[in-house]
Amino acid sequence: MAIDLVCGMEVNDYASGYSVIYAGERYLFCSEGCLAEFERHPQEYMSPPVSCCPGRSEEDGSSV
Amino acid sequence: MCRFVGYLGSDILIADLISRPANSLIRQSYKARERSEPLNGDGFGVGWYAPDITREPCVFTSITPAWSNRNFINLAEHTRSGSFFSHIRAASPGMGVSEVNCHPFRNGSLLWMHNGTVEGFQAIKRRLRNSLPDHIYDAIEGTTDSEHAFALFLKLLGEKKEQTSAADLAEGLVNTIWQLEEWAREAEISKPSVCNFAVTDGRAIASVRYVSDPQIEPISLYYSKRGKFQCCEGRSEIVECCAEESGVIIASERLTDKSGDWKRVAPNHVLTVDTHLNVKVRLIPEV
């Protein structure tokens, strides 16, 4: 089973007709709506990038 | 298209959500961030529960813009509740601006609010009204698609109305959308409806982010991570906290600038917050 990145539901790897290749990876979705939502805001549903500047906050850029 | 917020959890000041955050509901009444027309000035409303007094919520509505109503701000600064809805209105064309058309709508222990439009409402209005039992028909005071959708919800909820769970509320929302879509198809209404509905009985919340055509981006709807919402020296944030002081917020727009506090409700999904503040999101099955 895969996890739909938009809604968090489990998706059957074989039954889902909604998928997209993003940054070289294939992602599955439960519905057309979730697929379209991911395509509109892909960065929002990916894991936050690792900070390239240790000691700085991702949120506000300030030193922590 | 309106904007709204809903809250369930430990008691907080209503002002903590409607006037204090960076992107408070009052700010959204004149400068909404996530709709092309930023103005929501056709009235507002707030409904809150005081369960030590009664199970029925108190509702205050006004046709003034939320930003200029001193009573609203004063009330919010002096009222604590563990469950409340608040809504700012941008009236659809042809829908009158009056107190009875302001959300949230109340029936018994339930509150209801809507962000969106039931497309072609006039074409299905008579059919909808004819489907209602007298006691629900007679409770309709206004003219909006939103209140009529609430009436349909009440009919479909049926006898569960007095003892509802989060799942009951969610099932009622889905059935309401299905019925509206069926009537729209039969009336050959081709434009898609936008139905971000929210309903609560003061102990649980159900809400949907819905548009008839999945290719169209539905209007925004978020829920917060579970935690304590606090406002201090102009900075609002959601912090992890013990269960006794936690809450969950649903909101048309993120109230704070910290994006990690918020998650979008997936399009055409129904969200529930139960009495233990567990949040569940599931797909609305197609009819």
Image: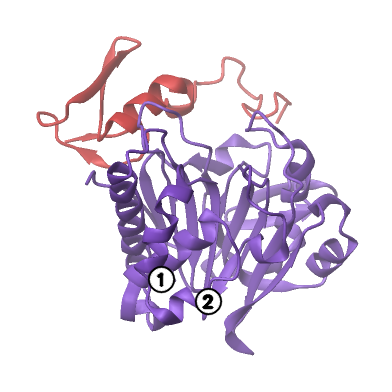
| Relative to B127, residue A44 above or below | above
| Relative to B184, residue B47 above or below | below
B259 and B60: which is toward the camera: B60
- Residue bearing mark 2: B139
| Chain at tag 2 | B
Q: Nearer the viewer, mark 2 or mark 1?
A: 2
Tell whether B131 sits left or right of B197.
left
Residue type highlighted by circle 1: Leu
Tell whether B264 sits left or right of B57.
left
B261 and B55: which is toward the camera: B55
Residue A20 falls in image quadrant: top left
Judging from the image, what is the letter of the chain drawn in red? A
Residue B120 position within the rendered picture, expressed as x and y whole percent measured from the top left: 45, 43
Q: Residue at x 56, y 20 (%)?
A: A51
Q: How packed is label 2: few (under 14 Cα within 10 Å), some, or many (20 or more)?
A: few
Judging from the image, what is the letter of the chain drawn in purple? B
Instruction: For residue B52, say whether it is visible.
Output: no
Q: Residue at x 52, y 79 (%)?
A: B109
A30 and B192: which is toward the camera: B192
- Residue bearing mark 1: B154
Residue B29 position within the rendered picture, expressed as x and y whole percent measured from the top left: 75, 45
The numbered disc on residue A26 is none
Residue B191 falls in image quadrant: top left
Residue B54 position within the rendered picture, expressed as x and y whole percent measured from the top left: 60, 88
Residue type highlighted by circle 2: Ala
Q: Residue at x 48, y 61 (%)?
A: B148
Display colour scheme? by chain
Name the quadrant of the N terminus of chain B. top right
Q: Residue at x 43, y 41 (%)?
A: B193
